[in-house]
Image (tube, rainbow, N blue to C red):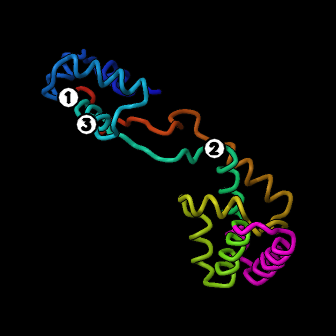
Amino acid sequence: MSTLIADSRRAVGWTMRDLAERLDVNTSTISRMEASERDGTIGVGTLSRALEAMGFSLHLGCDPARRGDLVALELHRAVAERIRASPGAVRARAMENIERLRAITNRDLARSWLDLWEQLVSGDIETLIDTMLEPSVLGRELRRHSPFGGTLTHEERLAAIERAIRAEPSVGTGPAEARRTRDPLRA
């Protein structure tokens, strides 16, 4: 699945023996760690400990860089600007959309998203904006079930999509990555 330990070890110029000495384990343990990482069976704690011994830290998370999620986030940032500029009109449009969507859906999950949106749209503006832009699973799911269709002009939508495309990371977008946390010359 991944080769963070081996790649990091090579990046700092260490052999398996060097890492084994640093972790106070046998070289065969390092070999098993690297094999279990390739197989996808390594524990997060073990992986983190090995990386930290080499001056890296492990960063895990959902990949927020999926293009659709980036586009949805940028579109909702533009919607947030419209909400601040014209809260009454944007709220009215969102409530119309919520009612229209309720009339055509019979799924409980979809209705629960609409109920949550209705609470947010009718509540405090900053809570609405903070919630719809938060980088959590909730924020992402809300953006996927948005009631803000028709809020942005064609030009605003295109500009938001362009920002998302420019912001799309090209490196390090996997589910886990190691980041150097100290001077690579210090061993």
Image side of residue 65 versus residue 78, left or right: left
Q: Which residue is mark 3?
A: 49
Q: Residue at x 50, y 35 (%)?
A: 172
Q: Residues within 10 Å of mark 1 (few under 14, many from 20)?
A: few
Q: Which residue is mark 2?
A: 66
Proximity of marks 1 and 2: CB atoms separated by less than 8 Å? no
Q: Which mark is residue 67?
A: none
Start-end of magenta stretch: 79-108
Q: Nearer the viewer, mark 2 or mark 3?
A: 3
Mark 2, secondary structure of its residue: loop
CA neighbours of label 2 inside 10 A, class few (<14), some (14 to 19), many (20+): few
67 to the left or right of 24: right
- Percent x, y for residue 93? 82, 77
Dots 2, 3 in contact, CB < 8 A: no
Is the magenta region chiefly helix, strand or loop?
Answer: helix
CA distance separating discs 2 and 3: 29 Å
Kindly report the distance in space between the C-alpha atoms of the residues bearing marks 1 and 2: 36 Å
* Label whose residue precedes the other's in the sequence (1 or 3): 3
Task: Name the element at disc 3.
Answer: helix
Q: Which comes sooner in the sequence, label 2 or label 3?
A: 3
